[in-house]
Amino acid sequence: MTLVIPPYVFHKKKVYKNGRVSFICGGCQRLDDLRYAWAEKSQQDGKETFKLKSWPEEHSCCPTSNAHLVREFRAALYAEVHANPTKPVPSIYDQVLDMFTKVMSAEDKLAFINEAPSAR
Ligand SMILES: [Zn+2]
């Protein structure tokens, strides 16, 4: 399970008995710096919900603002390729890219395409 506080991506680390859940910043972890975010777990209508309690203001890592979007893009791409095994990958790529970039400004779009995995 991941927690996204753009542009940072946290991974669930540990669930404590009192319902507190720790998340750790993946970018900082790669730099050997552990930055924690905390959430509280509760049950609502039989479903688990997490309420964010605190998060680090300072980070060692410096992901670009597109890092979390690129992750989502990659996941959407894989899902689409799996769902349409006979469709050529470049056309799936264009379709998913279009879905992600149509709401962006021209500037954001360029930056995103620069960081997104390429079709080939
Ligand atoms: Zn970080």
Image (cartoon, rainbow, N blue to C red):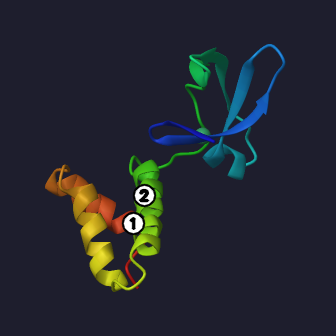
Q: Reply above or below: 87 against 67.
A: below
Residue 56 is drawn in which quadrant? top right
Numbered mark located on residue 2 in the image: none
Q: Position of residue 81 (x, y in %)?
A: 42, 74
CB of residue at label 2: within 8 Å of ligand 1? no
Residue 110, percent from left and from top? 24, 62
- Tag 2 residue: 70
Looking at the rendered structure, the secondary structure element under dot 2 is helix
- The picture quadrant where one finds residue 79 is bottom left
The answer to whether the residues at label 2 and label 1 have Cβ atoms under 8 Å apart is: yes
Q: Residue furthest front?
A: 46
Q: Quick check: 5 left or right of 61?
A: left
Q: What crowding class fits label 2: few (fewer than 14 Cα within 10 Å), some (14-19), or many (20 or more)?
A: some
- The type of residue carrying mark 2 is Val
- x 36%, y 82%: residue: 89
Image spot of residue 67 (x, y percent): 45, 52
**Observer-nearest residue: 82 or 23?**
82
Question: How many dots with numbers?
Answer: 2
Residue at the image position 44 percent from the left and 38 percent from the top? 6
Front residue (pair 59, 94): 94
Is 55 placed left or right of 15 in the picture?
left
* C-alpha separation, residue under disc 2 versus residue under disc 1: 5 Å
Q: Which residue is mark 1?
A: 116
Dot 1 amino acid type: Ala
Marks 2 and 1, the one that precedes in the sequence: 2
Q: Is residue 41 above or below residue 90?
A: above
Above or below, comparing residue 51 to residue 111 in the picture: above
Q: Quadrant of the N terminus?
A: top right
